[in-house]
Amino acid sequence: MRNFRKTAAITAAVMLSAGFAGCGDSSSDSGEHGRLLDTTSEATTQMTVELNTETLAPEQQEQVSALAEALTDKELENKTIKWLSFYDPWHPTGFGNSKPVSVELFEEKYDGEIKYYPTTWANQSSDLSTYVLSGEGIDFFPAIEAIPQYVISGMTESYDDYVDWDSPIWQSVQSLNDQYAVGGKHYLMACQATEGYVVYYNKQTIENMGFEDPAELYANGEWTLEKFREMLLGFVDTDAGQYGLDGWFNCTPLYLASGVPSISLENGKVKSNLMDPSLERAMTFQYDLYSNGLIFDKSLFSYNPQINFMGEGKELFYIGGLYEIESDPEIWTKTFGSAEDVFFVPIPRDEQADKYYYNAEIDCYNLCKGAQNPEGVARLMECVIASYNDESAIKISDEKHKNDYGWSDEMVEMKHEVHRLTSENPVRDIYGGLPSDYSTLLSDSINQAINGTDWYSTRDSIVDTVNTGLEEINAQIDKLR
């Protein structure tokens, strides 16, 4: 492990990320999130540092070469791996960003090449099926939704035969990967658990209302769901043009604060938590927000969030990802308002939960059934894991956020705090990985409470159907053993 950490440190000066996480929230709140993930202190930290050139400087290339020397020594008979996705994180975009260091490593060490097969979000599954049936040999693709549906349907296969779980590089992420094992095998190539959504607010609005700053409340251990609700109640006045909680993705991070997703993967099988009292409490909280008029009514604005209202002092909170302000400040300040007034805090703590649970994202990939080059994919995954790093890399990321994105020191510190919370008690809901009939049913149902339908009625209308479906799915999982 010491050697792995040493070589990971070499990456710090040239740290590049894959741009987008291999798995994450989709364009809709499709619920690809999951139960408590047992991460360890050995889990690496994801950074998203990019070089603003399309080629590495000579000294940076030397550092990549040094890190490549520490990777698995194995000659690839097939140098090309095929990537199917609705996005391409492996190649320069033409906007001045460099190739990720993982690709630099893959090319340096294995003379590897990644061939991109473009698709759309809506067509990814059908296109993958077409390629598999045609024998084209797509090697890997993104999506947490692969577990367990793609495993059962034979769209993905285990990668256990192509990695050494005793090696330091794979030991560093084994506990994370074990959370998604199905039928005793690993199918999801998980490289990192990363922070999820946060609560944005405008400092000036908070001050004008005489509220306590959420960041100070958090620092004092007082940033809870009840305080969150209390502030919304004190602010919302739609007749005066003052709105409460905006955003597309409010439902999931709020109920995951309870620590209980609707569907979890436990001991390699899917499990329903629909009747769990903690989930019931979380959904009742969301229904209460709606009933009190605290949820921003997007139907009044062509069903679109109005983030610009934050900068205008007309909106109190917005739940979204940090990626929304990880760009030139001239871009994000047009919606969020002046940089000195924009701030964010973690999703509030559920004061009735036993821990500060946090919604998490997973950087992960899937090996396609019939992949022509599984060895090549495994080696690329090692390059990805090796490009996640130590304190030096964190400092580089911090400087990028301040210099390129216009973040303050306080914003950078809060980002680290969100990551800490995620690392300690990350939670995801995996209902998006069920067959489409069930994932759609659950997605529609889970979002009902925050849109004004009581949880009891919704839950009782679906629980038997879901339980029957999970029994069938688990029976299919048993056949995989």
Image (cartoon, rainbow, N blue to C red):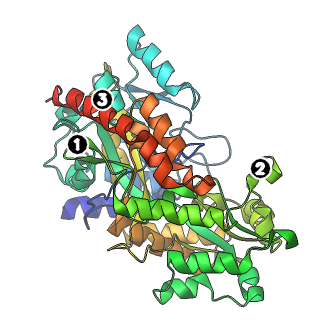
Q: Three-letter amino acid code at disc 2?
A: Ser
Quarter assignment of residue 140: top left
Q: Nearer the viewer, residue 68 or 305?
A: 305
Q: Nearer the viewer, residue 238 or 140?
A: 238
Q: How far apart are the alpha carbons under marks 1 and 2?
A: 54 Å
Left or right, 42 with respect to 339, comes to left
Q: Position of residue 206 (x, y in %)?
A: 71, 83
| Secondary structure of the residue carrying numbered label 2 | helix
Q: Which of the two discs, 2 and 3, labels the residue nearer the N terminus?
A: 3
Q: Position of residue 59 (x, y in %)?
A: 47, 57
Q: Nearer the viewer, mark 2 or mark 3?
A: 2
Q: Which of the two discs, 1 and 2, labels the residue nearer the N terminus?
A: 1
* Relative to 217, residue 309 above or below: above
- Residue under pointer 3: 151
Q: Position of residue 262 (x, y in %)?
A: 39, 50
Mark 1 and mark 3 in contact? Answer it, CB < 8 Å. no
Q: Three-letter amino acid code at disc 1?
A: Thr
Residue 233 disc label: none
* Relative to 223, residue 456 above or below: above
Q: Three-letter amino acid code at disc 3?
A: Val
Residue 72 disc label: 1
Residue at 47 percent across and 56 percent down: it is 60
Q: Residue furthest top?
A: 134
Quarter assignment of residue 142: top left
Residue 46 showing in the rendered view: no
Q: Quadrant of the N terminus?
A: bottom left
Q: Position of residue 192 (x, y in %)?
A: 36, 54
- Residue under pointer 2: 299
Q: Residues within 10 Å of mark 1 (few under 14, many from 20)?
A: some
Q: How far apart are the alpha carbons under marks 2 and 3?
A: 39 Å
Q: Residues within 10 Å of mark 2 (few under 14, many from 20)?
A: few
